[in-house]
Image: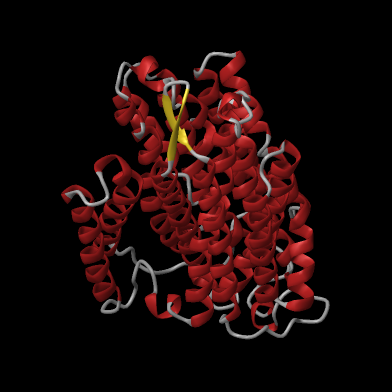
Amino acid sequence: MTTPPRTLIAVLALAGITVSLQQTFVIPLLPHLPALLHTTPGKASWAVTTTLIAGAVSIPITGRLADMWGERRVLLCCLSLLVTGSAVTALSTSLGWFVTGRALQGTAAGVVSLGISLLRDHLPARRLASATSVMSTSLGVGASVGIPLSALLAQYTDWRVLFWTAGGLATAAGVLVLLVVPRTSRPRDGRFDPLGALLLSGALVCLFLAVSQGGGWGWTSGLTLGSFAGAAALLVLFGAWELRIPQPLIDLRVSRRPQVLLTNTASVVFGFAMLTNSLVFTQLLQMPATAGYGFGESMLVAGLLQAPGGVCMTAMSPVSARMTTHFGPKVTLMAGALVLACSYGFAALWHAQLWQLLICTALVGAGIGLAYGAMPSLVMDAVPAGQTAAANGLNNLCRSLGTSAAGAVTGLLLAAGTTTVSGRAVPDPAAFTTVLLAGAAAALLALVVAAFIPGRPRVARGRGMTRAAAGRVPEV
């Protein structure tokens, strides 16, 4: 029995939202973790760092395994790890167990790219553009609603409820995937590349450690510079090895095609621009009103401000699909970058009133919704069907690198300009404006990068995607 397309899209999008929720669920808890787990603030930050590293390492590996063993099987494994990690975190009484649970949660980061690959295998070509747009934006939607939802649960319930909720949602998503998502009939073959996985994992660990912990270690410290150097050396070795073997973990010959390379480059910049909004406005809203430029709101109110962004991302998914169908994914990606640049330019000039922050948040969500919906189409049009999961996983990894860089750069810029309010140092107004201008510059850079992506593919009339891609997608 064939699964209705809408049901398939809804189930896979739920899985994507569930995974992205756990990435932001811990944010409201960070100020309280030292007391809850009897540790220091510096060590408590590993609750976020470990998840980022585990996700970065797992994304390319799960993508390759999915192309070999089938996306459905690997997707169920990822959701099982998310359930296990949520339970370990909820039951933890020490930092070690808490971080272990968060690492297990992070290994599910490849679910969105797996979902996009499943959609390519099971949907008619005419439905693929809209479906991949919904699946891709689920990453941003989950991150947007995760902060207000977790703040609400943390404020009115026990903190462990956050992780039991994450585990419950992952269990429900796994059951639905098991019942709804059909097995893929496409032939599977290939070997896993253990040395390539080891080299890439080591490089990503070094890189994400340097980016996420550089502020605490000191950007010129030996530990930070050594981590960057180690990442660079391992990436060179990884590239040399991948070009030598017939079945690499990531096919660099395909990944360096202009359409794939430039799309992934734009993804890094979009990831940076997406998180900048949340980092700046969350702090600005909680800044004491006595500072003269703060709003004095609670974490719950600050988190709720992110909700309009998630709503706009969802609303722009069908718009992104229609634009991709009629004008091509390149134009859609450029439109998203332009909207994002305008939103940050607006916020840099006007952020003294709550309605101004709401407008910017909504525009950022709209720009991300347009861009994230177009990226999978650009990637899938340029790679063979047998490499869809790995290629989309690499694109997802590039976004994660951008969001990690945003946290590091934002923290550095805000710490560079401070003032004293009620006896404590807080970022001054000029620092917030600088970060918002950096977000606008990042969006403009993404616009320039997208402009160099090879020209608009010919669209199969009435089919919803390019002729080349339409020929690779089976009807069901």
Residue at image location 67% in from the left, 66% down from the top? 338
User: Can residue 4 be seen in the rendering of this structure?
Assistant: no
Q: Position of residue 193 (x, y in %)?
A: 30, 64
Please tell me whether residue 331 is drawn above or below residue 227 in the rendered image.
Answer: below
Residue at image location 55% in from the left, 30% down from the top? 166
Residue 369's image quarter? bottom right
Identify the image quadrant of the C terminus.
bottom right
Question: Left or right: where does residue 156 sit relative to residue 262?
Answer: right
Residue lying at the far left in this picture: please name it.
222
Residue situated in front as seen by the camera: 297 or 14:
297
Please tell me whether residue 44 is drawn above or below residue 427 in the rendered image.
Answer: above
Please tell me whether residue 367 is drawn above or below residue 109 in the rendered image.
Answer: below
Q: Position of residue 141 (x, y in %)?
A: 65, 45
Residue at image location 25% in from the left, 55% down from the top? 202
Q: Position of residue 337 (x, y in %)?
A: 64, 65
The colour scheme of the drawn protein is secondary structure
Q: Position of residue 12 (x, y in %)?
A: 64, 49
